[in-house]
Amino acid sequence: MSKSDWNSPEAARRIARRNASELRFKMIGLGAIVLSLSFLALLLVIMLKNGVAGLDWRFLSGSDSTEATVAGVWGATKGSLLTMGVTLLLSFPMGVLAAIYLEEFAPKKRWIEWIEVSINNLAAVPSIIFGLLGLAVFINTLGMPRSSPLVGGLTLALMTMPVIVISGRNAIKAVPPSIREAAYGIGASKVQTTFHHVLPLALPGILTGTIIGMARALGETAPLLMIGMRAFVATPPDGLTSPSSVLPMQIFLWSDEIDKAFVQNTSAAIIVLLVFLLAMNGIAIYLRNKFEVRW
Amino acid sequence: MILTGVLLAVFGLGLVGWFAARGRARLLYTGRGSMHSMPAYHGWHMALWILVPALLAWGVWSAIMPGLVEGAVFADPAAASLPTDPMTLGAIVSEAHNLASDPSATAFNPEARVLVEPIRAAQARFGLIGALLVMVVAIAGGGYGFTRIRADFRARTQVERAVMALLLAASLMAVLTTFGIVGSLVFEAGLFFKDVSPIAFLTGTHWSPASTMGANINDNFGAVPLFWGTIYIGAIIAMIVAIPLGLMSAVYLTQYASGAMRKWLKPMLEILAGIPTVVYGYFAALTVAPMIRDFAASMGMQNPSTESALAAGLVMGVMIIPFVSSMADDALAAVPRAMSDGSLALGSTKSETIKKVLLPAALPGIVAGVMLAISRAIGETMIVVMAAGAAANLSANPLASMTTVTYQIVQMLTGDQEFNSPKTLSAFALGLVLFVVTLILNIVALRVVKRFREAYE
């Protein structure tokens, strides 16, 4: 019997062994995903189990309180909305304009490279560093009011802008040159081409990136901790400069309470926050699917 | 405030100017090619001439007005009787300002009441002067803009030049932010290193910034236990969880899963990355940490603490899984198809190809991805704040309570202590170390990725 005899029991054993090892490897891969996803499932189930009973109108419309049964999330939600409003108003126009400049107009020069490098680095800087910047610049140097949605929004805008620039550049890059050439061909100037043709076509992509960046900012706690947004605020903030809390901060503050009754509040607030994030990501996915053009 | 009102008036004037200039330019139109720019560009040109100078004037006036008000108030006879001590004087003046804007505010110094009337009068006077100044500038700018409306005037070129300036300013914002971060961290850390020697800070092993005991302040600011805790939690425990799970997930998703499965599993895995860190922190503190404490107790440990490095590291690892997975995904996708095809053609099975060909070929990319993941893990704050503990232990026991750089930054800055104490300033020194380390990790990783891509192109 030669060694290359495929019908020998020896060959059959070797093939079986290799098949088994193949299957084992595949199962390890599947197991890794299942294990990761079961963490997610466990987290969601525990939050739902603890929190769902606390979700009622009183909880959704109330503000923070020392009494677990009367505490609610509306104050923190309103603070989050105000903060996100400031963030969006600043980071979206700035991010889009910067992306347009870098992608369409920037000359290939040394100092332009500096801008690109600093944007890429800012996107990877830990969020707590932005909090230190906000504390040192906005509060200590410019004297803006502590724990206000204004300062929180400014800090988060600096953090979100690089995300919008990067996604905006990718969206603008994806618009084919033929669109631009057609516009030049009928006599449009470079600025007209960009704002009348390239930007509208890139907008769905830019919006998707913006929503994802905003969702990240909405869940961010650490930088806001630095600028003092951890005050106990028993009434919803009535302006951009009044002390306020935000949803993730409310979760953090309640998680520190010794009273066991706050476990339910914390979990319910987490459910509220996750619902917001899920809705934002859902909108982003919808936009991408609805308006994405394959050139 | 009259200055806020005048801002609205300026914008209204800009709108009026836009329509007026466009209307005037339309009258000039006599047929194809009779004008250089379209009427709307004349409108924009006019609006810019109204808005830009007026807003500049407004900004300058808002900046100098408090100084002018101050001068006028001190020149007032009512201010003559004030104490000269700068501390008390400052307190009185700031109280008087509060009273002037809100009469129901409380004042501790009776002298503050005296100053209210002069402050109000000065504010009204200088506010009115400023408002008039801004309006004059706006009208003058608009008048100049209006005279430029001619058939051959290149309004579009001018407007586009302004647009370019705006675009450039927006891009420079990123550089400004970087300078802001580096500047503020270096400045505040510099103040800290005036009191504490950098060498003692980077090599000392005793961290107790709260204690004022001990003759030498250098002994209380040894940050090595913090660095160790950060590395142990973020770069060791978290990576032990994240690397195998993330890598194997990526292998399965790219090599084995069918298109439909991949379409469902990948977004689900990415949900893990979208969950806010404060939720992970709560999950760690509520569920994982007690489980680990009970486990430690069953192993015969005396008084295990609820806060352990293991709990924080485990949960942080779970958080990082999708990140490692997507980096490994990219690295595997960058390996040329011909390499795995060649291996398969020689008769090796799929798993043999992955283990012997694909993974070694993708290794530089995977390593870079892991470096980025580590930089993200060591900068992570909320999980360690909620689950890791405050005690600066220099130990290798994963069940011990450990503290990290980010935890201490939060700890130092969320109390109500005065700002310029070494304790508060140490947060900025820690922040500087964190910033430099993550920056180096990111730059090196991006270099490796770039070189790795080039190797296969």
Image (tube, coloured by chain):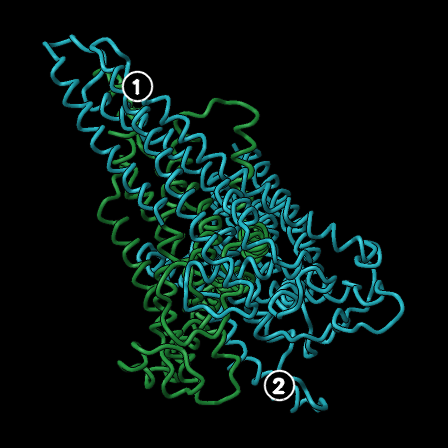
What colour do you see for chain B?
cyan
Give the percent coordinates (x, y) of residue B419.
66, 61
Instruction: Tell me which amino acid carries mark 2.
Output: Arg
Secondary structure of the residue carrying tag 2 is helix
For image coordinates 72% across by 91% down, the residue present is: B302
Viewer-proximal residue among A165 and B22: B22
Looking at the image, residue B274 sits to the left or right of residue B401; the answer is: left
Q: Residue at label 1?
A: B144
Q: Residue at label 2?
A: B293
Viewer-proximal residue among B182 and A151: A151
Subunit under mark 2: B
Q: Is residue A238 above or below residue A209?
A: below
Looking at the image, residue B430 sits to the left or right of residue A216; the answer is: right
What colour do you see for chain A?
green
Subunit under mark 1: B
Give the percent coordinates (x, y) of residue B90.
61, 57
Give the percent coordinates (x, y) of residue A289.
25, 49
For image coordinates 26% across by 26% down, the residue present is: B44
Q: Residue furthest right?
A: B215
Q: Is residue B238 above or below residue B168?
A: below
